[in-house]
Image (cartoon, helix red, strand yellow):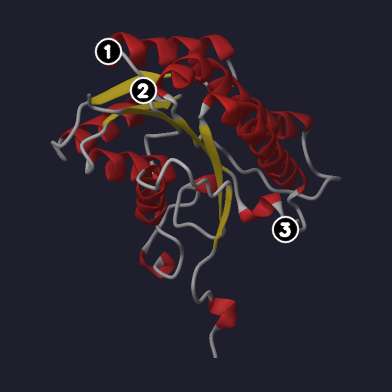
Amino acid sequence: MTKTAYITGGSKGIGLGIAEALLNEGIHVAISARTLSELKIAEEKLRAIGKGEVLSIQSDVRNITNEENAVRKVIDTWGRLDYCIANAGIGKFSPIYDMKPEDWNSVVDINLTGVFHTVKAAIPALKKSKGYIFTIASLAGTNFFQEGAAYNASKFGLVGFSQAIMLDLRPYEIKVTTIMPGSVATFINGQTPSEKDNWKIQPEDIGQMVVDLVQMNARTLPSKIEVRPTVPPSARK
């Protein structure tokens, strides 16, 4: 039976890169995001790959009912869920004395509580499939930086959450891996990737990593993976 994946924040960036990689393996892929227009563009791009079925679902990870409905739609469409990739995330950066409470709340609500909602909604289906959860954290989850109070807090929390649920879920043969990328050529904080970002990790690199992990022998679990650009500008001579 064809395996299936649900990817939050799947309309662009890392989420889209993971979706493309899994589709190229013939896995059915459902992507979700808040913005319907971006979802439809991504869905059209993914369908052109032609190696697996594609489903797009409008959902806000801050709302657990949204995520429960999204997972239910995956099950109703394909009858199973094998891979849950909790990727949705945002970045808002400012010194603490300038940080707006609404910015703090949005970062923590999406990057941390949103992952809880996605994972919580997916667990019953993943118990049946002995599935795999991926959380997309960041090196900011172990390396703090100036003007990163909200982002650091959300990613430090996400790493701790991911490692704790790994212990909770392995008796059910559900794997949990958190991937912690450094600089990625993506759209975070309003950026648009360009050729000058070629030195950065690319979304397809994270996609290939997810494929490699799901193909690993079931007895082995890399539970936390740090990923860095090989030669960032600061390291060049």
Q: Which mark is residue 77?
A: 1
| Residue 178, above or below 32 | below
- Horizontal side of 40 relative to 126 (left or right) equals left
Image coordinates of residue 163 in percent, x first then y, are 66, 39
Q: Which residue lies at the image location 52% right of the left edge and 46% below the top edge?
A: 221
Q: Nearer the viewer, residue 34 or 223?
A: 223
Image coordinates of residue 70 in percent, x first then y, are 42, 15
* Gap in angstroms between the C-alphas marked 1 and 2: 19 Å
Q: Which residue is mark 3?
A: 143
- SS at mark 3 in the image: loop
The quarter of the image holding the C terminus is bottom right
Residue lying at the far right of the rendered structure: 97
First in sequence, mark 3 or 1: give its number.
1
Q: Which mark is residue 165?
A: none
Image coordinates of residue 205 in percent, x first then y, are 38, 56
Q: Which residue lies at the image location 77% right of the left edge and 58% below the top edge?
A: 146
The quarter of the image holding the N terminus is top left
Q: Is residue 61 visible?
A: no
- Horizontal side of 32 relative to 117 (left or right) equals left
Q: Which residue lies at the image location 37% right of the left edge and 48% below the top edge?
A: 207
Residue lying at the far front of the rendered structure: 219
Image coordinates of residue 30 in percent, x first then y, are 33, 26
First in sequence, mark 1 or 2: give its number.
2
- Horizontal side of 81 relative to 175 (left or right) equals left
Q: Which residue lies at the image location 72% right of the left edge and 47% below the top edge?
A: 152
* Gap in angstroms between the C-alphas marked 3 and 1: 41 Å
Q: Which residue is mark 2?
A: 36
Q: Residues within 10 Å of mark 3 (few under 14, many from 20)?
A: few
Residue lying at the far bottom of the rendered structure: 237
The residue type indicated by label 1 comes to Thr
